[in-house]
Image: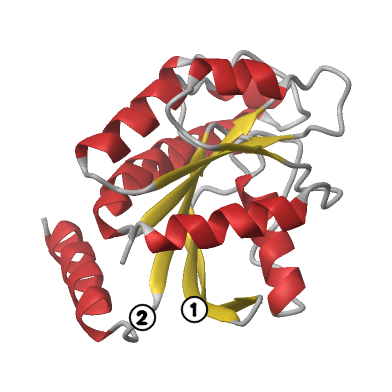
């Protein structure tokens, strides 16, 4: 109970004292969709530093991490963001899956526990977002329970959404499938790892900001 009260107070006061005009931009999606990779790309482009670590092992990000005062400029426009990278959301977490990546049983169990807590925190933070980027791995079926649930929750909260189809540099990537799964949303295809199509992404991001005003 004390932890819940502290978390509520933290989010409440962060909202009260956040700098006027700052956009709280959340990154949501399945594990390994590329949330942290894209957040790192943005931070590298505008701050010259990374936000967090990435790994091939699922649920590398298991705690909320953020970067404040990220100022993006484009064609005379300037927007200040607070980038909020959230742990990947999954419908099932099995510690044995982590052992397939070489983790020992105890480490795998710890990671599974932390990943579960991370999902809970991700959902709690939805109410703090001004806008959200939903990262979807363009190499796999986009019409998944996780993607539908995330977007459905954002719609219910009337939070502006931009869908980013990541990993277009891979042969299996199919942005048309992502567009077909969510035709009512703008979909931008990128490679967060290589920076492919990043300029189109930034343009779409500025459009997204307008919906928060």
In which quadrant will I find the C terminus? bottom left
Q: Would you say 126 lies left or right of 190 here? A: left
Res 23 seen here: yes
Residue 108 drawn above or below residue 93: below
Secondary structure at numbered mark 2: loop
Residue 145 position within the rendered picture, expressed as x and y whole percent measured from the top left: 42, 16
Viewer-proximal residue among 119 and 140:
140
Secondary structure at numbered mark 1: strand
Q: Would you say 146 lies left or right of 149 here? A: right
Which residue is tagged 1?
80
In which quadrant will I find the N terminus? bottom left
Which residue is tagged 2?
21
First in sequence: mark 2 vs mark 1: 2
Q: Within the image, what quadrant is residue 101 found in?
A: top right
The crowding category of the residue bearing disc 1, from other C-alpha atoms within 10 Å (few below 14, some 14 to 19, many at least 20), is: some
Q: What residue lies at 63% left-to-right and 28% top-to-bottom?
A: 105
Residue 141 position within the rendered picture, expressed as x and y whole percent measured from the top left: 61, 13
Structural distance between the alpha carbons of marks 2 and 1: 7 Å
Q: What residue lies at 46% left-to-right and 25% top-to-bottom?
A: 147
Q: Would you say 208 lies left or right of 102 here? A: left
Viewer-proximal residue among 173 and 30:
173
Residue 42 position within the rendered picture, expressed as x and y whole percent measured from the top left: 68, 65
Q: What residue lies at 39% left-to-right and 22% top-to-bottom?
A: 148
Residue 185 position within the rendered picture, expressed as x and y whole percent measured from the top left: 46, 33
Residue 71 drawn above or below residue 212: below
Is mark 2 in CB contact (under 8 Å) with mark 1? yes
The crowding category of the residue bearing disc 2, from other C-alpha atoms within 10 Å (few below 14, some 14 to 19, many at least 20), is: few
């Amino acid at each position: 109970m004390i932890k819940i009260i502290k978390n509520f107070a933290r989010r409440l006061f962060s909202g009260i004292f956040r700098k006027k005009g700052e956009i709280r931009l959340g990154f949501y999606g399945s594990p390994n969709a590329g949330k942290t990779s894209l957040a790192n790309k943005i931070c590298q482009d505008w701050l010259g530093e990374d936000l967090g670590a990435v790994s091939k092992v699922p649920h590398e990000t298991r705690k909320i991490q953020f970067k404040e005062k990220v100022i993006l400029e484009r064609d005379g426009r300037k927007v200040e963001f607070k980038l909020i990278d959230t742990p990947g959301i999954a419908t099932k977490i099995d510690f044995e899956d982590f052992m397939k990546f070489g983790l020992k049983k105890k480490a795998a169990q710890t990671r599974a526990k932390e990943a579960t807590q991370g999902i809970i925190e991700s959902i709690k933070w939805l109410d703090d977002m001004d806008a959200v980027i939903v990262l979807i791995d363009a190499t796999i079926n986009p019409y998944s329970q996780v993607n539908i649930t995330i977007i459905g929750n954002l719609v219910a909260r009337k939070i502006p959404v931009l869908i980013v189809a990541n990993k277009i540099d891979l042969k299996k990537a199919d942005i048309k499938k992502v567009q077909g799964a969510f035709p009512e949303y703008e979909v931008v295809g990128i490679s967060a790892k290589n920076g492919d199509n990043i300029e189109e992404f930034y343009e779409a991001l500025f459009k997204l900001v307008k919906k928060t005003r």
